[in-house]
Amino acid sequence: MLFVRTALLFLLLAASLEAQKLTPLAPRLEWSSLGKFQRTITKEEFTRLLTQVYAPREAWRESFTIAEDHATVVTTPGQPLFRLDFAPDEASAKPIPRYWKPTRSLRGLRIAIDPGHLGGEWARMEERWFQIGENKPVIEGNMVLEVAELLQKELERRGAKVVLLRTTSKPATNLRPEKLRTSAAASLRERGRPVNPASLKAESERLFYRTAEIHARARLVNQRYKPDLVLALHFNAEAWGNPARPTLTDLNHLHLLVSGCYSARELEYDDQRYDLMVKLLNRSFDREVGVSRAVAQGMARATGLPPYTYTGDTAINVGGSPYVWARNLLANRLFECPVVYLEPYVMNNREVHDRVQLGDYSGRRKINGTSRESICREYVRGVVDGLAAYHGRP
């Protein structure tokens, strides 16, 4: 038995030292760092989270094996990477090692607010900018920063300890597109895309604002701030067609995202398997879905928006709320603590566009015959009401 266990450990070590299949800009992995989670979870709980939340629709089968007393993470050809031993039962499970605390009080709750995207000079590159005629441009990165600053004040007034991941449009990453051309070429080749000046430019820019920036913010969250909760603020949009002649729509909706619903193809990457294990084993999901459900209720009351419904296989509805969906995104995957990821309003909706033109204001104004707060303050009220309700102070 000792020989068998020693041989298995040798295989695991050898596998971890082999070339790892990583998504662009992901760091090399130390699978042994997951050893702190040994015997912290039962087989039943691990199986529930893996098969129903993180890798549903049988997506887990090529990357994980589940035995009676342990689970093994494997590569696509079946090479073992990490063995996790289960706790025999809940009573004997070891404490979960994590930096966040599942407190039920707003007072003292450590919150990091992530104003999505960058805005400012980067907004056009991010494709989070549009303008109708001579109207004020609609810039998501600027709008969520304005919401974040108002939200910070309201939450601090209620006793929370709040930090913003950005206070300007300056990137958290030191990388820029021109430094990412080699990685961009490798990314294009790996996906079978042609490498030419146009595709190289577009991929370098995408890796800058969508990948390097999120990795940098994740390091701030996981290594510096270590909050109990991240609020990731966004505005949604429908396709607006030609950027030179964007179109407005009557569609308007709301949804929130939690980490989950990895596909079998995504789990071919070692870092995605690793990130899944961290989120699953530190038990982010139940906290994420509980807070998200409460915030969704607060946002629905504040905005009157209907839920957005995913029709493809990239997301699954969770938590018993039509507003809350599990989806595998880089931000909610890399942030190790629970993340409430908000996607309210359609920026190119006609009424939303009109409200954005008004900017922030105190009090209420008539919009299409209805008295409304500014869109920023309505957003903040929905989030605060939801958080207060979840934490016992409706």
Image: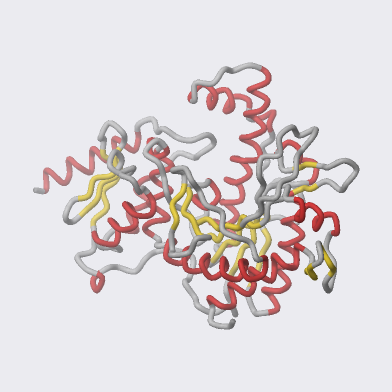
The image quadrant of residue 254 is bottom right
Q: Is residue 7 left or right of residue 339?
A: left
Residue 313 x, y percent position in the rendering: 44, 43
The image quadrant of residue 307 is bottom right
Q: Is residue 28 left or right of residue 170?
A: left
The answer to which of 209 and 343 lies nearer the viewer is: 343
Q: Is residue 204 above or below residue 150?
A: above
Q: Residue furthest bottom?
A: 393
Q: Residue furthest left?
A: 1
Q: What's the coloring here?
A: secondary structure
Q: Is residue 243 left or right of residue 135?
A: left
Residue 108 x, y percent position in the rendering: 59, 77
Q: Is residue 321 above or below residue 351?
A: below
Residue 141 x, y percent position in the rendering: 73, 50
The answer to which of 156 and 223 lies nearer the viewer is: 156
All told, the count of numbered labels is 0
Q: Residue furthest right?
A: 134
Q: What residue is shown at x 25% (from left), y 61% (from top)? A: 44
Q: What residue is shown at x 66% (from left), y 79% (from top)? A: 158
Residue 39 x, y percent position in the rendering: 26, 61
Quadrant (top left, top right, bottom left, bottom right) of the C terminus: bottom right
Q: What residue is shown at x 82% (from left), y 72% (from top)? A: 364
The answer to which of 270 and 290 lies nearer the viewer is: 290
The image quadrant of residue 111 is bottom right
The answer to which of 359 and 302 lies nearer the viewer is: 302
